[in-house]
Amino acid sequence: MNPSVANVESWLRVWRTARHLRGSQLAYRLMRITRDRLRVRTRTSGHPRRQAVVARQPEATIPRVPDFSRGCAAGAPLVAALRQGELCLVNRTLPFQAAAPDWRLGAQREDRLWAITLHYHAWLYELARLIPVDAAGSTSVDKDHGAARESPPGPDAETLFHTLLHDWLDTCDLRQPGAEPLAWNSYAIATRLGWWARLWHTLGPHYWTRQPQLAETFLQSMHAQASHLAAHIEWDLRANHLLRDAVGLAWAGRFFRGGEAARWLNIASRIADRQADEQMLADGGHFERSPFYHLEVMDDWLTLARLLPARQVSEKMQATWRRSAEYARWLCHPDGRVAQFNDGAAAVAANHFLHDCETWRRIGAASPRGGRWLAQTGVVAWHGEPWTLFWDVGDVGPACQPGHAHADTLTVEASFQGHRLLVDPGSYGYDDDTRRTYDRSTAAHNTVLIDQQNSSEVWHIFRVGRRARPRQVSARIGTDQLWARAAHDGYDHLPGRPRHTRTVAVQNQGTLRIVDDVKGRGNHAVDGGLLIAPQWRAIAVPDGWQLSLDGITLRVAIQSTCELETSIECRPIHPDYGVEQDTQRLCWSYRGKLPIEVALAIEPTSPTNL
């Protein structure tokens, strides 16, 4: 492409991305860029004056808040890894020397998710839990949180804890070069404040009395972080980041005493109250439309319900959590893991449900039965026998923040007899690399690709320009069968305006049918396929494929109004962050004039009948 043309197209892509933003987002981002370039320090940056700490002592206890998923090793394996100069976060073990730790300060181009998770300090909390209980017995957090202490693996845990905490306080002070991008990133601070509050109370007053200098430095840093967070709320990013900022301020507000702590609580309450209305859709789903982040946000709703003192807001948070829990229940495969639309892992939902036992007893541990069209989020769900099905017929995300979106409109996930069958490529990490490009691409999902163009214009790490919008969505749900149809306009900008329409039908003890109809003018390249879970084995057979697993045999029959080429390709999937597995993709392709219709039928069969 001519460089001048490419430059114009690049600017147009930026325009297609930025035009959806709110004016307040653009203004706040411009303010941040200007401040950073001029190196203007806000008055809350840096540590507060030494003499002010006395008025900012922590409360004796904090409300009972569950220890949510920490994404790191725990117990003796954590100590053993640190002894060996390693640390495992988000399923990846990287070098990390306790004697001279690399805190990944400054802008990071590789392992960005690992690096920011390092600064959450959930792993530091795990080290604190290994330090032997003093003579006073269990601390208030042990009782309130029901967190049983690990059997200490010796003095190494306490030595490592002291060494690493001291080094972080010295090296990652805001005044140090490169500290702000990750260590003092607002989302990282908000997450870390929760783990630091737990850490402080887990160790207990007798411990900190024996460490007065460390205690003073720790409290000064924690207070400075809360002040910095209050001055750097992520109004530009919004979505789950804005909600996590509220969680961080709520932790700080309940942890410290005094007027400033009360102000943080008021800010957290206002954000939480408004974001419950903005971020939670009428069907109970989160507006970013990622089941994984839906669970993360669920944890934040429950944390806010426990921390915010205003009864009305607290009750609203609890009610929001209950609605989101019911939605999450509908998005679970039989293996207990949620669907993997957009960014995120195939997380176990029960780990999040069980933090509110009353609601869990009410909605029940068993999977729902039948079908539901979750119209606002844009998911058609079916829980039958032997099929479980999830179909994405919604927007890629909120207009103002689709950063976790994939170009996956009309993609399908399915399980058969409790086994995952049709899977999503998932998300390996958040680096600007080929894995990220693949994970977000239309070609990696169980939908249709036209002219090698993504249905939504996903680019860089979290950017989306042109967005596919669902059209003509309809669904008929009976007691034992589901029929649904939807189209999208993601390819309308291409010559001939090709339009993809998909029909999905499934019935109990019957066949899963997926029919793709592509209309438009002119010649086009049309590709489709299905990603198969790694435990299944696929082979080509006449007019389709055969799938087998543990004595189960499925026939995938393919029919088309035009001549197709079919194949089986090896593709990667990422069922969790930092995890890559090879699997098979059933592929079909067509090159020619539109329209074309391709029908897939998946049904159980016997190998002898093939």
Image: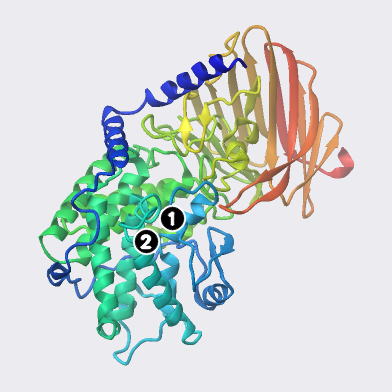
- The quadrant of the image that shows the N terminus is top right
Residue 424 seen in render = no
Residue 167 in the image: x percent, y percent?
A: 40, 70
Apparent side of residue 391 relative to residue 123 in the rendered image (left or right): right
Q: Mark 2 vs mark 1: which is more N-terminal?
A: 1
Residue 305 in the image: x percent, y percent?
A: 26, 57
Q: Nearer the viewer, residue 259 or 27?
A: 27
The local crowd at label 1, few if under 14, some if 14 to 19, many if 20 or more residues have their Cα within 10 Å, is: some
Apparent side of residue 209 relative to residue 409 in the rendered image (left or right): left
Residue 296 in the image: x percent, y percent?
A: 41, 52
Location of residue 434 (image quadrant): top right
Name the residue that disc number 2 marks.
172
Residue 28 in the image: x percent, y percent?
A: 27, 35
Apparent side of residue 316 relative to residue 346 in the rendered image (left or right): left
Q: Do the residues labelled 2 and 1 touch (CB within 8 Å)?
A: yes
Q: Is mark 2 on a helix, strand or loop?
A: loop
Taking the spot 55% from the left edge, 40% from the top edge, the residue there is: 432
Mark 2 vs mark 1, CA separation in Å: 8 Å
Name the residue that disc number 1 marks.
105
Q: Which of 554 and 238 is in front in this view?
A: 238
